[in-house]
């Protein structure tokens, strides 16, 4: 069944198409994609597809491939994304067939999708591309009462929240723009502590732009204060159905006061008060690591599966580019890194 595909650039009005989808989450607005297109040194694009059985909306970042002039790859922005379907699953095959042809015609070599664990959009995309399980994520079920949610917290988590309160740490929603700068500095300190890759050191303007409201999201900055000093913070994204823990930061010397436990509890309370279905805390850096275990203290082990989709759209050019990188660095083609030609060491 053929259908109509509309390609959207940064100059087009995406909201006309976004309005057609009741389930789109915070990661699907043009503003959000633009934010991370700047991080990725690419441009925001999207496609809308429709036939008589349903419709699909799919935003992504198009990046130039530095190794080969005139060639590109596409990737979903930081967070979770991928095509969202409204209608019958049969729509995916004609949509993707047309989309893939268009990518090939425009010298797009690979596609990488970070699928949305709560929307489970990997389920209908696995028919048309390679889908790999990466790790678990976890979320608080906000359909329960706040009392029940807190009752389900792990016992050591409850103790640490009490400790933070007893020490005089306060968690609150910040209304002060100057606090964003303080959060940014704490965030950089946290990235240093975690030996994070350079990708996560977002530039200074990023933090202000992330606070802007979009058609699909509202952003909150939650802070933990101790003796009038901000010692930790969280950026929380609020969508139609879900809240998302986006970025966290804390001052190393105050970690024993357990500000993060208190902040996560405040994040749960705020998200619950806004009438949402779930607060998605995400996962760890690796399966079942200490970060994931910390997040699971709040969720009663309510876990989801995170998948990544990978597609090589031009085998010849992909292998040519990958080979040149492999010749330069000491690794082989069995590396899990994708796309291989973007590996730096």
Image (cartoon, rainbow, N blue to C red):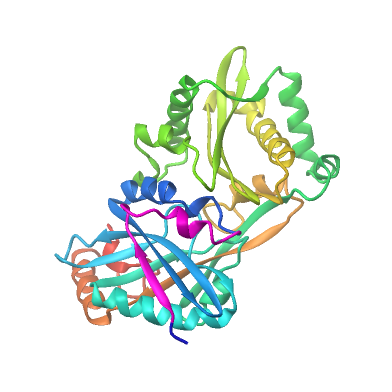
Q: Residue at x 30, y 76 (%)?
A: 102
Q: Residue at x 61, y 63 (%)?
A: 119
Image-based side of 33 in relation to 278, left or right: left
Most foreground residue, 138 or 8? 8
Decide: is 314 above or below 58.
below
Q: Which of the 4 quarters of the picture holds residue 151?
A: top right
Residue reaching furthest to the left: 69
Q: Position of residue 213 (x, y in %)?
A: 50, 38
Label count reads: 0
Q: Is residue 17 magenta?
A: yes
The magenta segment? 3-22
Q: Residue at x 40, y 82 (%)?
A: 97
Most foreground residue, 310 or 133? 310
Decide: is 175 above or below 239.
above
Q: Which of the 4 quarters of the picture holds residue 338?
A: bottom left
Q: Position of residue 257 (x, y in %)?
A: 66, 25
Most foreground residue, 36 or 202? 36
Image-based side of 61 in relation to 252, left or right: left
Residue reaching furthest to the top: 227
Residue reaching furthest to the bottom: 1
Q: Position of residue 237 (x, y in %)?
A: 56, 42
Decide: is 264 above or below 253.
below
Q: Which of the 4 quarters of the picture holds residue 297?
A: top right
Q: Is residue 171 magenta?
A: no
Image-based side of 260 in relation to 127, left or right: right
Image-based side of 171 in relation to 236, left or right: right
The quarter of the image holding the C terminus is bottom left
Q: Position of residue 96 (x, y in %)?
A: 43, 78
């Amino acid at each position: 069944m053929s259908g109509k595909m509309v390609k959207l650039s940064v100059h087009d009005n995406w909201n006309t198409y976004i309005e057609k989808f009741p389930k789109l989450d915070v990661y699907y607005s043009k503003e959000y994609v633009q934010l991370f297109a700047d991080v990725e040194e690419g441009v925001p694009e999207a496609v809308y597809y429709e036939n008589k059985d349903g419709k699909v909306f799919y935003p992504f970042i198009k990046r130039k491939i530095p190794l080969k002039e005139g060639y590109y790859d596409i990737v979903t922005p930081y967070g979770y994304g991928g095509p969202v379907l409204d209608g019958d699953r049969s729509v995916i095959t004609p949509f993707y067939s047309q989309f893939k042809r268009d990518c090939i015609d425009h010298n797009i070599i690979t596609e990488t999708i970070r699928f949305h664990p709560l929307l489970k959009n990997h389920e209908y995309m696995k028919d048309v591309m390679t889908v790999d399980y990466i790790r678990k994520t976890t979320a608080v079920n906000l359909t329960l009462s706040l009392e029940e949610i807190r009752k389900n917290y792990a016992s050591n988590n409850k103790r640490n929240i009490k400790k933070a309160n007893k020490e005089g740490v306060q968690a609150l929603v910040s209304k002060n723009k100057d606090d964003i700068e303080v959060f940014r500095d704490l965030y950089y300190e946290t990235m240093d502590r975690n030996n994070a890759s350079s990708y996560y050191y977002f530039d200074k303007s990023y933090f202000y732009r992330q606070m802007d409201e979009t058609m699909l999201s509202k952003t909150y900055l939650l802070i933990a204060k101790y003796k009038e000093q901000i010692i930790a913070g969280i950026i929380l994204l609020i969508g139609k159905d879900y809240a998302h823990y986006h970025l966290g930061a804390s001052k190393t010397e105050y970690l024993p006061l357990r500000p993060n436990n208190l902040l996560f509890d405040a994040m749960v309370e705020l998200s619950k008060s806004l009438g949402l279905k779930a607060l998605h805390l995400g996962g760890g850096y690796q399966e079942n690591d200490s970060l994931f275990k910390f997040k699971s203290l709040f969720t009663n082990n309510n876990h989801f599966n995170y998948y990544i989709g990978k597609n090589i759209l031009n085998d010849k050019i992909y292998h040519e580019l990958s080979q040149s990188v492999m010749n330069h660095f000491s690794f082989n083609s069995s590396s899990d890194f994708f796309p291989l030609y973007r590996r730096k060491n």
